[in-house]
Image (cartoon, coloured by chain):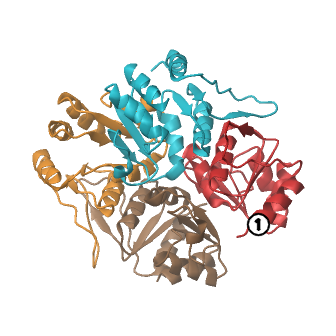
Chain colours: A brown, B orange, C cyan, D red
Amino acid sequence: MAFELGRGIAQRDAVLICGGLTGVMEHAARGARAAGGLTIGLLPGDDPDEANEYVHIAIATGLGHARNAILARTADGVVAVGGGLGTLSEIALALRNGRPTIGIHTWRFDRDRRTEPELPIAANPKDALDWLFSRMER
Amino acid sequence: MAFELGRGIAQRDAVLICGGLTGVMEHAARGARAAGGLTIGLLPGDDPDEANEYVHIAIATGLGHARNAILARTADGVVAVGGGLGTLSEIALALRNGRPTIGIHTWRFDRDRRTEPELPIAANPKDALDWLFSRMER
Amino acid sequence: MAFELGRGIAQRDAVLICGGLTGVMEHAARGARAAGGLTIGLLPGDDPDEANEYVHIAIATGLGHARNAILARTADGVVAVGGGLGTLSEIALALRNGRPTIGIHTWRFDRDRRTEPELPIAANPKDALDWLFSRMER
Amino acid sequence: MAFELGRGIAQRDAVLICGGLTGVMEHAARGARAAGGLTIGLLPGDDPDEANEYVHIAIATGLGHARNAILARTADGVVAVGGGLGTLSEIALALRNGRPTIGIHTWRFDRDRRTEPELPIAANPKDALDWLFSRMER
Protein backbone atom coordinates (compact mmCIF):
# COMPACT_ATOMS: atom_id res chain seq x y z
CA MET A 1 0.00 0.00 0.00
CA ALA A 2 2.82 2.41 0.85
CA PHE A 3 4.54 1.42 -2.39
CA GLU A 4 1.39 2.26 -4.34
CA LEU A 5 1.06 5.60 -2.58
CA GLY A 6 4.62 6.54 -3.43
CA ARG A 7 4.15 5.46 -7.02
CA GLY A 8 0.89 7.38 -7.31
CA ILE A 9 2.48 10.53 -5.90
CA ALA A 10 5.27 10.37 -8.49
CA GLN A 11 2.83 9.56 -11.29
CA ARG A 12 0.98 12.76 -10.39
CA ASP A 13 4.29 14.65 -10.79
CA ALA A 14 4.57 15.47 -7.09
CA VAL A 15 7.63 15.12 -4.88
CA LEU A 16 7.46 12.56 -2.04
CA ILE A 17 8.57 13.78 1.36
CA CYS A 18 8.65 11.24 4.18
CA GLY A 19 10.58 10.40 7.32
CA GLY A 20 13.35 8.73 5.34
CA LEU A 21 13.75 5.59 7.45
CA THR A 22 12.48 2.00 7.03
CA GLY A 23 9.00 0.46 6.88
CA VAL A 24 6.21 2.55 5.38
CA MET A 25 8.71 5.34 4.65
CA GLU A 26 10.97 3.04 2.64
CA HIS A 27 8.13 1.37 0.72
CA ALA A 28 6.70 4.75 -0.25
CA ALA A 29 10.11 6.03 -1.40
CA ARG A 30 10.66 2.83 -3.38
CA GLY A 31 7.29 3.31 -5.08
CA ALA A 32 8.04 6.92 -5.98
CA ARG A 33 11.41 5.90 -7.43
CA ALA A 34 9.77 3.13 -9.47
CA ALA A 35 7.71 5.80 -11.20
CA GLY A 36 10.70 8.10 -11.75
CA GLY A 37 9.81 10.47 -8.91
CA LEU A 38 11.95 12.60 -6.61
CA THR A 39 12.11 11.60 -2.93
CA ILE A 40 13.00 13.61 0.18
CA GLY A 41 13.73 12.05 3.58
CA LEU A 42 13.33 14.22 6.65
CA LEU A 43 15.48 12.23 9.06
CA PRO A 44 15.23 12.39 12.85
CA GLY A 45 18.97 11.83 13.30
CA ASP A 46 22.02 13.85 12.34
CA ASP A 47 23.55 11.47 9.80
CA PRO A 48 22.35 11.69 6.18
CA ASP A 49 23.51 8.09 5.68
CA GLU A 50 20.64 6.87 7.88
CA ALA A 51 18.23 7.41 4.98
CA ASN A 52 16.88 4.39 3.13
CA GLU A 53 18.36 3.73 -0.30
CA TYR A 54 15.37 5.17 -2.16
CA VAL A 55 15.78 8.68 -0.74
CA HIS A 56 17.39 11.16 -3.14
CA ILE A 57 17.69 14.06 -0.71
CA ALA A 58 18.35 13.23 2.92
CA ILE A 59 17.74 16.14 5.29
CA ALA A 60 19.48 15.29 8.57
CA THR A 61 17.41 17.34 10.99
CA GLY A 62 18.91 15.98 14.22
CA LEU A 63 15.63 16.93 15.92
CA GLY A 64 14.14 13.50 16.67
CA HIS A 65 10.35 13.58 16.57
CA ALA A 66 10.36 17.39 16.53
CA ARG A 67 11.01 16.91 12.82
CA ASN A 68 7.38 15.83 12.47
CA ALA A 69 6.45 19.50 12.86
CA ILE A 70 8.64 20.35 9.86
CA LEU A 71 6.93 17.74 7.71
CA ALA A 72 3.55 19.19 8.72
CA ARG A 73 4.72 22.64 7.56
CA THR A 74 6.48 21.57 4.38
CA ALA A 75 4.10 19.11 2.74
CA ASP A 76 1.36 20.48 0.50
CA GLY A 77 -0.72 17.49 1.54
CA VAL A 78 -0.35 14.47 3.84
CA VAL A 79 -1.35 10.81 3.61
CA ALA A 80 -1.01 9.09 6.98
CA VAL A 81 -0.53 5.34 6.81
CA GLY A 82 -0.74 2.84 9.65
CA GLY A 83 0.05 3.22 13.33
CA GLY A 84 2.62 4.68 15.59
CA LEU A 85 2.32 7.61 17.94
CA GLY A 86 4.75 9.66 15.85
CA THR A 87 2.27 9.33 12.99
CA LEU A 88 -0.53 10.52 15.25
CA SER A 89 1.50 13.61 16.17
CA GLU A 90 2.06 14.33 12.48
CA ILE A 91 -1.63 14.01 11.64
CA ALA A 92 -2.49 16.40 14.46
CA LEU A 93 0.00 19.04 13.34
CA ALA A 94 -0.82 18.72 9.63
CA LEU A 95 -4.54 19.23 10.36
CA ARG A 96 -3.68 22.11 12.64
CA ASN A 97 -1.67 23.76 9.87
CA GLY A 98 -4.62 23.42 7.49
CA ARG A 99 -2.86 20.98 5.18
CA PRO A 100 -5.14 18.58 3.27
CA THR A 101 -4.66 15.35 5.23
CA ILE A 102 -6.13 11.88 4.76
CA GLY A 103 -5.52 8.52 6.44
CA ILE A 104 -5.36 4.86 5.46
CA HIS A 105 -5.61 2.21 8.21
CA THR A 106 -4.60 4.77 10.78
CA TRP A 107 -5.84 6.57 13.90
CA ARG A 108 -9.38 7.69 14.69
CA PHE A 109 -9.69 10.43 17.28
CA ASP A 110 -12.38 12.59 18.74
CA ARG A 111 -13.30 14.69 21.74
CA ASP A 112 -16.46 16.19 23.19
CA ARG A 113 -17.48 19.52 21.69
CA ARG A 114 -14.87 19.11 18.97
CA THR A 115 -14.21 22.13 16.79
CA GLU A 116 -11.11 20.72 15.07
CA PRO A 117 -11.33 19.26 11.53
CA GLU A 118 -11.96 15.57 10.86
CA LEU A 119 -9.39 13.21 9.37
CA PRO A 120 -11.01 11.57 6.34
CA ILE A 121 -10.16 7.89 5.83
CA ALA A 122 -9.60 6.36 2.41
CA ALA A 123 -10.13 2.72 1.51
CA ASN A 124 -7.08 2.50 -0.76
CA PRO A 125 -4.16 4.54 -2.14
CA LYS A 126 -5.96 5.63 -5.31
CA ASP A 127 -8.90 7.07 -3.39
CA ALA A 128 -6.54 8.78 -0.93
CA LEU A 129 -4.55 10.47 -3.69
CA ASP A 130 -7.62 11.44 -5.72
CA TRP A 131 -9.00 13.17 -2.64
CA LEU A 132 -5.65 14.76 -1.74
CA PHE A 133 -4.71 16.13 -5.14
CA SER A 134 -8.16 17.61 -5.67
CA ARG A 135 -7.54 19.72 -2.55
CA MET A 136 -3.94 20.82 -3.08
CA GLU A 137 -3.54 24.06 -4.92
CA ARG A 138 0.18 24.72 -5.04
CA MET B 1 -9.69 22.98 36.49
CA ALA B 2 -6.33 24.10 35.06
CA PHE B 3 -5.86 26.34 38.10
CA GLU B 4 -6.44 23.37 40.41
CA LEU B 5 -4.00 21.23 38.44
CA GLY B 6 -1.31 23.87 38.71
CA ARG B 7 -1.95 24.32 42.40
CA GLY B 8 -1.89 20.57 42.98
CA ILE B 9 1.41 20.20 41.12
CA ALA B 10 3.02 22.89 43.29
CA GLN B 11 1.52 21.42 46.48
CA ARG B 12 3.20 18.13 45.58
CA ASP B 13 6.52 20.03 45.35
CA ALA B 14 6.83 19.58 41.60
CA VAL B 15 7.75 22.18 39.00
CA LEU B 16 5.07 23.12 36.45
CA ILE B 17 6.18 23.17 32.83
CA CYS B 18 3.66 24.32 30.24
CA GLY B 19 3.44 26.14 26.93
CA GLY B 20 3.67 29.53 28.63
CA LEU B 21 0.87 31.31 26.76
CA THR B 22 -2.77 32.09 27.64
CA GLY B 23 -5.81 29.90 28.42
CA VAL B 24 -5.16 26.56 30.11
CA MET B 25 -1.44 27.35 30.25
CA GLU B 26 -1.99 30.61 32.10
CA HIS B 27 -4.56 29.20 34.52
CA ALA B 28 -2.24 26.32 35.40
CA ALA B 29 0.70 28.67 35.96
CA ARG B 30 -1.47 30.94 38.10
CA GLY B 31 -2.49 27.94 40.21
CA ALA B 32 1.09 26.82 40.71
CA ARG B 33 2.13 30.33 41.73
CA ALA B 34 -0.78 30.51 44.21
CA ALA B 35 0.71 27.52 45.99
CA GLY B 36 4.25 28.94 45.93
CA GLY B 37 5.44 26.77 43.06
CA LEU B 38 7.99 27.31 40.31
CA THR B 39 6.69 27.66 36.73
CA ILE B 40 8.41 27.15 33.38
CA GLY B 41 6.95 28.30 30.06
CA LEU B 42 8.18 26.60 26.90
CA LEU B 43 7.19 29.26 24.38
CA PRO B 44 6.66 28.66 20.66
CA GLY B 45 7.97 32.12 19.73
CA ASP B 46 11.35 33.76 20.06
CA ASP B 47 10.45 36.49 22.55
CA PRO B 48 10.56 35.65 26.28
CA ASP B 49 8.13 38.51 26.90
CA GLU B 50 5.33 36.51 25.25
CA ALA B 51 5.01 34.42 28.40
CA ASN B 52 2.03 34.94 30.66
CA GLU B 53 2.69 36.83 33.88
CA TYR B 54 2.70 33.68 36.04
CA VAL B 55 5.69 32.12 34.29
CA HIS B 56 8.96 32.43 36.24
CA ILE B 57 11.26 31.00 33.56
CA ALA B 58 10.35 31.71 29.94
CA ILE B 59 12.21 29.51 27.45
CA ALA B 60 11.87 31.17 24.04
CA THR B 61 12.26 28.15 21.78
CA GLY B 62 11.37 29.87 18.50
CA LEU B 63 10.32 26.43 17.19
CA GLY B 64 6.54 26.84 16.95
CA HIS B 65 4.74 23.57 17.58
CA ALA B 66 8.00 21.65 17.31
CA ARG B 67 8.44 22.74 20.93
CA ASN B 68 5.76 20.21 21.87
CA ALA B 69 8.38 17.52 21.31
CA ILE B 70 10.63 19.19 23.90
CA LEU B 71 7.85 19.24 26.47
CA ALA B 72 7.26 15.53 25.83
CA ARG B 73 10.97 14.85 26.52
CA THR B 74 11.38 17.17 29.50
CA ALA B 75 8.32 16.51 31.66
CA ASP B 76 8.46 13.65 34.15
CA GLY B 77 4.70 13.32 33.66
CA VAL B 78 1.98 14.98 31.61
CA VAL B 79 -1.62 16.02 32.27
CA ALA B 80 -3.39 16.92 29.02
CA VAL B 81 -6.35 19.25 29.44
CA GLY B 82 -8.99 20.11 26.86
CA GLY B 83 -8.78 20.29 23.10
CA GLY B 84 -6.58 21.57 20.37
CA LEU B 85 -4.56 19.62 17.85
CA GLY B 86 -1.31 20.82 19.41
CA THR B 87 -2.41 19.11 22.61
CA LEU B 88 -3.11 15.91 20.68
CA SER B 89 0.42 16.01 19.23
CA GLU B 90 1.84 16.41 22.74
CA ILE B 91 -0.15 13.50 24.11
CA ALA B 92 1.06 11.31 21.25
CA LEU B 93 4.74 12.19 21.79
CA ALA B 94 4.56 11.96 25.59
CA LEU B 95 3.06 8.45 25.38
CA ARG B 96 5.62 7.52 22.76
CA ASN B 97 8.43 8.62 25.08
CA GLY B 98 7.01 6.48 27.86
CA ARG B 99 6.12 9.41 30.09
CA PRO B 100 3.20 8.84 32.50
CA THR B 101 0.39 10.74 30.77
CA ILE B 102 -3.23 11.29 31.72
CA GLY B 103 -6.04 13.38 30.24
CA ILE B 104 -8.97 15.46 31.48
CA HIS B 105 -11.75 16.38 29.04
CA THR B 106 -9.41 15.73 26.14
CA TRP B 107 -8.93 13.49 23.09
CA ARG B 108 -9.84 9.81 22.72
CA PHE B 109 -8.01 7.95 19.98
CA ASP B 110 -7.71 4.43 18.76
CA ARG B 111 -6.80 2.31 15.76
CA ASP B 112 -7.30 -1.27 14.65
CA ARG B 113 -4.74 -3.73 16.01
CA ARG B 114 -3.39 -1.07 18.35
CA THR B 115 -0.17 -1.85 20.19
CA GLU B 116 0.39 1.66 21.55
CA PRO B 117 -0.46 2.51 25.17
CA GLU B 118 -3.83 3.91 26.23
CA LEU B 119 -4.37 7.43 27.52
CA PRO B 120 -6.14 7.12 30.87
CA ILE B 121 -8.80 9.77 31.55
CA ALA B 122 -9.34 11.33 34.96
CA ALA B 123 -12.60 12.80 36.23
CA ASN B 124 -10.95 15.70 38.05
CA PRO B 125 -7.55 17.28 38.84
CA LYS B 126 -7.06 15.43 42.13
CA ASP B 127 -7.57 12.02 40.54
CA ALA B 128 -5.28 12.98 37.64
CA LEU B 129 -2.46 14.03 39.95
CA ASP B 130 -2.88 11.08 42.30
CA TRP B 131 -2.50 8.75 39.33
CA LEU B 132 0.39 10.73 37.83
CA PHE B 133 2.51 11.12 40.94
CA SER B 134 2.13 7.45 41.84
CA ARG B 135 3.81 6.64 38.49
CA MET B 136 6.63 9.20 38.40
CA GLU B 137 9.88 8.02 39.84
CA ARG B 138 12.30 10.89 39.30
CA MET C 1 36.41 31.26 36.42
CA ALA C 2 33.18 29.56 35.39
CA PHE C 3 32.44 28.91 39.05
CA GLU C 4 32.89 32.62 39.83
CA LEU C 5 30.65 33.60 36.92
CA GLY C 6 27.89 31.30 38.13
CA ARG C 7 28.24 32.58 41.67
CA GLY C 8 28.19 36.19 40.52
CA ILE C 9 25.07 35.62 38.43
CA ALA C 10 23.25 34.17 41.44
CA GLN C 11 24.53 36.92 43.73
CA ARG C 12 22.98 39.44 41.33
CA ASP C 13 19.65 37.57 41.73
CA ALA C 14 19.64 36.30 38.16
CA VAL C 15 18.89 32.78 36.94
CA LEU C 16 21.72 30.85 35.29
CA ILE C 17 20.90 29.16 32.01
CA CYS C 18 23.60 27.02 30.41
CA GLY C 19 24.05 23.91 28.30
CA GLY C 20 23.62 21.65 31.30
CA LEU C 21 26.51 19.28 30.66
CA THR C 22 30.06 19.03 32.06
CA GLY C 23 33.07 21.39 32.01
CA VAL C 24 32.36 25.11 31.98
CA MET C 25 28.62 24.42 32.17
CA GLU C 26 28.98 22.34 35.32
CA HIS C 27 31.37 24.74 37.05
CA ALA C 28 29.04 27.66 36.37
CA ALA C 29 26.02 25.75 37.69
CA ARG C 30 27.98 24.73 40.78
CA GLY C 31 28.89 28.38 41.39
CA ALA C 32 25.30 29.53 41.05
CA ARG C 33 24.14 26.83 43.47
CA ALA C 34 26.83 27.82 45.96
CA ALA C 35 25.24 31.29 46.10
CA GLY C 36 21.71 29.91 46.41
CA GLY C 37 20.77 30.56 42.78
CA LEU C 38 18.44 28.79 40.39
CA THR C 39 20.02 26.88 37.47
CA ILE C 40 18.56 25.81 34.12
CA GLY C 41 20.25 23.33 31.77
CA LEU C 42 19.30 23.41 28.10
CA LEU C 43 20.43 19.92 27.13
CA PRO C 44 21.27 18.80 23.60
CA GLY C 45 19.96 15.27 24.21
CA ASP C 46 16.53 13.91 25.00
CA ASP C 47 17.19 12.58 28.50
CA PRO C 48 16.82 15.00 31.43
CA ASP C 49 19.14 12.76 33.48
CA GLU C 50 22.09 13.86 31.31
CA ALA C 51 22.20 17.16 33.21
CA ASN C 52 24.99 17.74 35.68
CA GLU C 53 24.05 17.51 39.33
CA TYR C 54 23.93 21.28 39.86
CA VAL C 55 21.11 21.84 37.37
CA HIS C 56 17.70 22.37 38.97
CA ILE C 57 15.63 22.41 35.78
CA ALA C 58 16.81 20.17 32.94
CA ILE C 59 15.19 21.00 29.59
CA ALA C 60 15.77 18.00 27.33
CA THR C 61 15.61 19.66 23.94
CA GLY C 62 16.71 16.67 21.84
CA LEU C 63 17.94 19.18 19.23
CA GLY C 64 21.71 18.76 19.48
CA HIS C 65 23.52 22.01 18.72
CA ALA C 66 20.31 23.54 17.36
CA ARG C 67 19.59 24.18 21.03
CA ASN C 68 22.23 26.91 20.95
CA ALA C 69 19.70 29.03 19.04
CA ILE C 70 17.23 28.64 21.92
CA LEU C 71 19.80 29.81 24.44
CA ALA C 72 20.50 32.85 22.27
CA ARG C 73 16.76 33.69 22.30
CA THR C 74 16.09 32.94 25.95
CA ALA C 75 18.98 34.56 27.81
CA ASP C 76 18.71 38.24 28.73
CA GLY C 77 22.49 38.38 28.44
CA VAL C 78 25.32 36.01 27.58
CA VAL C 79 28.85 35.45 28.91
CA ALA C 80 30.84 33.23 26.56
CA VAL C 81 33.72 31.38 28.20
CA GLY C 82 36.52 29.50 26.49
CA GLY C 83 36.63 27.66 23.20
CA GLY C 84 34.61 25.24 21.18
CA LEU C 85 32.83 25.82 17.92
CA GLY C 86 29.45 25.38 19.58
CA THR C 87 30.34 28.37 21.75
CA LEU C 88 31.23 30.38 18.64
CA SER C 89 27.82 29.58 17.13
CA GLU C 90 26.14 30.75 20.33
CA ILE C 91 28.08 34.02 20.39
CA ALA C 92 27.11 34.67 16.77
CA LEU C 93 23.41 34.07 17.36
CA ALA C 94 23.29 35.97 20.65
CA LEU C 95 24.87 39.03 19.00
CA ARG C 96 22.52 38.63 16.04
CA ASN C 97 19.54 38.64 18.40
CA GLY C 98 20.77 41.82 20.02
CA ARG C 99 21.44 40.25 23.40
CA PRO C 100 24.16 41.88 25.51
CA THR C 101 27.05 39.46 25.03
CA ILE C 102 30.58 39.45 26.41
CA GLY C 103 33.46 36.98 26.26
CA ILE C 104 36.23 35.72 28.52
CA HIS C 105 39.18 33.85 26.97
CA THR C 106 37.09 33.09 23.93
CA TRP C 107 36.90 33.71 20.16
CA ARG C 108 37.91 36.84 18.25
CA PHE C 109 36.33 37.24 14.83
CA ASP C 110 36.18 39.84 12.13
CA ARG C 111 35.56 40.38 8.45
CA ASP C 112 36.19 43.08 5.89
CA ARG C 113 33.56 45.81 5.79
CA ARG C 114 32.01 44.47 8.98
CA THR C 115 28.68 45.94 10.00
CA GLU C 116 27.94 43.41 12.74
CA PRO C 117 28.50 44.31 16.43
CA GLU C 118 31.74 43.58 18.25
CA LEU C 119 32.11 41.04 21.04
CA PRO C 120 33.63 42.84 24.03
CA ILE C 121 36.17 40.83 26.01
CA ALA C 122 36.42 40.99 29.81
CA ALA C 123 39.54 40.31 31.84
CA ASN C 124 37.70 38.50 34.63
CA PRO C 125 34.23 37.38 35.79
CA LYS C 126 33.52 40.48 37.84
CA ASP C 127 34.20 42.83 34.93
CA ALA C 128 32.13 40.65 32.60
CA LEU C 129 29.13 40.68 34.92
CA ASP C 130 29.41 44.38 35.73
CA TRP C 131 29.31 45.11 32.00
CA LEU C 132 26.51 42.63 31.33
CA PHE C 133 24.15 43.63 34.11
CA SER C 134 24.53 47.31 33.29
CA ARG C 135 23.12 46.50 29.85
CA MET C 136 20.28 44.13 30.69
CA GLU C 137 16.98 45.79 31.27
CA ARG C 138 14.57 42.95 31.98
CA MET D 1 30.02 35.24 -7.15
CA ALA D 2 27.11 33.43 -5.53
CA PHE D 3 25.65 32.83 -9.00
CA GLU D 4 28.93 31.25 -10.12
CA LEU D 5 29.07 29.07 -7.02
CA GLY D 6 25.56 27.78 -7.62
CA ARG D 7 26.31 27.14 -11.26
CA GLY D 8 29.55 25.36 -10.41
CA ILE D 9 27.81 23.14 -7.87
CA ALA D 10 25.23 22.08 -10.45
CA GLN D 11 27.90 21.57 -13.12
CA ARG D 12 29.61 19.17 -10.74
CA ASP D 13 26.31 17.24 -10.50
CA ALA D 14 25.73 18.17 -6.88
CA VAL D 15 22.52 19.41 -5.27
CA LEU D 16 22.52 22.97 -3.90
CA ILE D 17 21.13 23.39 -0.40
CA CYS D 18 20.86 26.92 0.97
CA GLY D 19 18.73 29.07 3.23
CA GLY D 20 16.15 29.60 0.50
CA LEU D 21 15.65 33.36 0.93
CA THR D 22 17.01 36.40 -0.94
CA GLY D 23 20.52 37.78 -1.53
CA VAL D 24 23.37 35.26 -1.69
CA MET D 25 20.88 32.41 -1.29
CA GLU D 26 18.84 33.52 -4.27
CA HIS D 27 21.82 34.20 -6.52
CA ALA D 28 23.28 30.78 -5.76
CA ALA D 29 19.95 29.06 -6.47
CA ARG D 30 19.61 31.01 -9.73
CA GLY D 31 23.09 29.87 -10.74
CA ALA D 32 22.34 26.24 -9.99
CA ARG D 33 19.12 26.42 -11.98
CA ALA D 34 20.94 28.01 -14.91
CA ALA D 35 23.10 24.89 -15.10
CA GLY D 36 20.11 22.55 -14.78
CA GLY D 37 20.73 21.70 -11.12
CA LEU D 38 18.39 20.80 -8.29
CA THR D 39 17.97 23.35 -5.47
CA ILE D 40 16.80 22.93 -1.88
CA GLY D 41 15.85 25.84 0.39
CA LEU D 42 15.97 25.28 4.14
CA LEU D 43 13.69 28.11 5.22
CA PRO D 44 13.64 29.70 8.68
CA GLY D 45 9.88 30.32 8.53
CA ASP D 46 6.88 28.03 8.36
CA ASP D 47 5.59 28.97 4.91
CA PRO D 48 7.07 27.18 1.89
CA ASP D 49 6.01 30.14 -0.27
CA GLU D 50 8.72 32.27 1.36
CA ALA D 51 11.33 30.54 -0.80
CA ASN D 52 12.87 32.43 -3.68
CA GLU D 53 11.68 31.44 -7.15
CA TYR D 54 14.78 29.38 -7.94
CA VAL D 55 14.21 26.88 -5.12
CA HIS D 56 12.74 23.55 -6.27
CA ILE D 57 12.20 22.04 -2.83
CA ALA D 58 11.28 24.41 -0.02
CA ILE D 59 11.65 22.87 3.45
CA ALA D 60 9.69 25.09 5.84
CA THR D 61 11.51 24.38 9.08
CA GLY D 62 9.80 27.01 11.22
CA LEU D 63 12.93 26.99 13.42
CA GLY D 64 14.41 30.43 12.66
CA HIS D 65 18.20 30.37 12.90
CA ALA D 66 18.10 26.95 14.56
CA ARG D 67 17.77 25.70 10.99
CA ASN D 68 21.44 26.58 10.49
CA ALA D 69 22.25 23.50 12.55
CA ILE D 70 20.29 21.34 10.09
CA LEU D 71 22.20 22.74 7.15
CA ALA D 72 25.47 21.96 8.95
CA ARG D 73 24.32 18.33 9.39
CA THR D 74 22.83 17.83 5.94
CA ALA D 75 25.38 19.33 3.56
CA ASP D 76 28.26 17.15 2.38
CA GLY D 77 30.31 20.33 2.12
CA VAL D 78 29.83 24.04 2.78
CA VAL D 79 30.91 27.24 1.01
CA ALA D 80 30.33 30.28 3.22
CA VAL D 81 29.95 33.55 1.35
CA GLY D 82 29.98 37.04 2.79
CA GLY D 83 28.91 38.33 6.15
CA GLY D 84 26.13 38.01 8.62
CA LEU D 85 26.20 36.46 12.06
CA GLY D 86 23.91 33.64 10.93
CA THR D 87 26.60 32.70 8.42
CA LEU D 88 29.20 32.69 11.20
CA SER D 89 27.04 30.32 13.25
CA GLU D 90 26.75 28.00 10.23
CA ILE D 91 30.50 27.99 9.63
CA ALA D 92 31.08 27.13 13.28
CA LEU D 93 28.64 24.22 13.28
CA ALA D 94 29.74 22.87 9.89
CA LEU D 95 33.39 22.80 11.05
CA ARG D 96 32.30 21.23 14.32
CA ASN D 97 30.50 18.47 12.43
CA GLY D 98 33.61 17.78 10.39
CA ARG D 99 32.11 18.88 7.09
CA PRO D 100 34.57 20.21 4.49
CA THR D 101 33.98 23.97 4.75
CA ILE D 102 35.56 26.88 2.90
CA GLY D 103 34.88 30.62 2.85
CA ILE D 104 34.88 33.45 0.31
CA HIS D 105 34.94 37.04 1.58
CA THR D 106 33.71 35.89 4.94
CA TRP D 107 34.66 35.72 8.62
CA ARG D 108 38.11 35.14 10.10
CA PHE D 109 38.16 33.84 13.68
CA ASP D 110 40.70 32.62 16.14
CA ARG D 111 41.36 32.11 19.82
CA ASP D 112 44.34 31.47 22.04
CA ARG D 113 45.38 27.84 22.30
CA ARG D 114 43.01 26.93 19.48
CA THR D 115 42.47 23.25 18.81
CA GLU D 116 39.56 23.69 16.42
CA PRO D 117 40.08 23.42 12.64
CA GLU D 118 40.83 26.42 10.44
CA LEU D 119 38.43 27.82 7.84
CA PRO D 120 40.30 27.95 4.54
CA ILE D 121 39.56 30.99 2.37
CA ALA D 122 39.29 30.81 -1.41
CA ALA D 123 39.97 33.67 -3.82
CA ASN D 124 37.11 32.79 -6.15
CA PRO D 125 34.25 30.30 -6.70
CA LYS D 126 36.26 27.93 -8.88
CA ASP D 127 39.03 27.56 -6.31
CA ALA D 128 36.45 27.10 -3.54
CA LEU D 129 34.66 24.32 -5.40
CA ASP D 130 37.85 22.60 -6.53
CA TRP D 131 38.96 22.44 -2.90
CA LEU D 132 35.54 21.37 -1.64
CA PHE D 133 34.82 18.60 -4.13
CA SER D 134 38.28 17.13 -3.68
CA ARG D 135 37.39 16.62 0.00
CA MET D 136 33.83 15.32 -0.23
CA GLU D 137 33.56 11.59 -0.39
CA ARG D 138 29.85 10.88 -0.44
**At which x and y percent is residue B103?**
21, 54
User: Residue A46 sits in which quadrant?
Assistant: bottom right
In the image, A95: left or right of C115?
left
Q: Secondary structure at mark 1?
A: loop
Q: Is residue D93 left or right of residue B103?
A: right
The answer, for residue A54, to whether it is visible in the render is yes
The kind of residue on which mark 1 rests is: Ala
Q: Which residue is mark 1?
A: D14
Q: Nearer the viewer, residue C105 or A22?
A: C105
- Quadrant that contains the C terminus of chain C: top left
Q: Which residue does the image show at 73% across and 64% down from the upper left?
A: D15
Residue C85: x %, y % from top left: 62, 45
* Residue C122, x across and y down, in percent: 60, 22
- Image side of residue B126 versus residue B82, left or right: left
How far across and how far down the image is residue C3, in percent? 44, 30
Question: From where the camera sits, is residue C13 visible?
Answer: no
Which of the 4 quarters of the picture holds residue A32?
A: bottom right
Q: Chain of mark 1?
A: D
Q: How many marks?
A: 1
On screen, residue C40 above or below A23: above
Q: Residue furthest front?
A: D113
Indicate the quadrant where residue C16 lies.
top left
- Determine the residue positioned at 59% across, 51% down: D69
Q: Is residue C57 above or below residue C34?
A: below
Q: Which residue: 59% across, 22% down?
A: C123
Vertical placement of residue B14 versus C95, above or below:
below
Residues packed near mark 1 inside 10 Å, few (<14), some (14 to 19) or many (20 plus): some
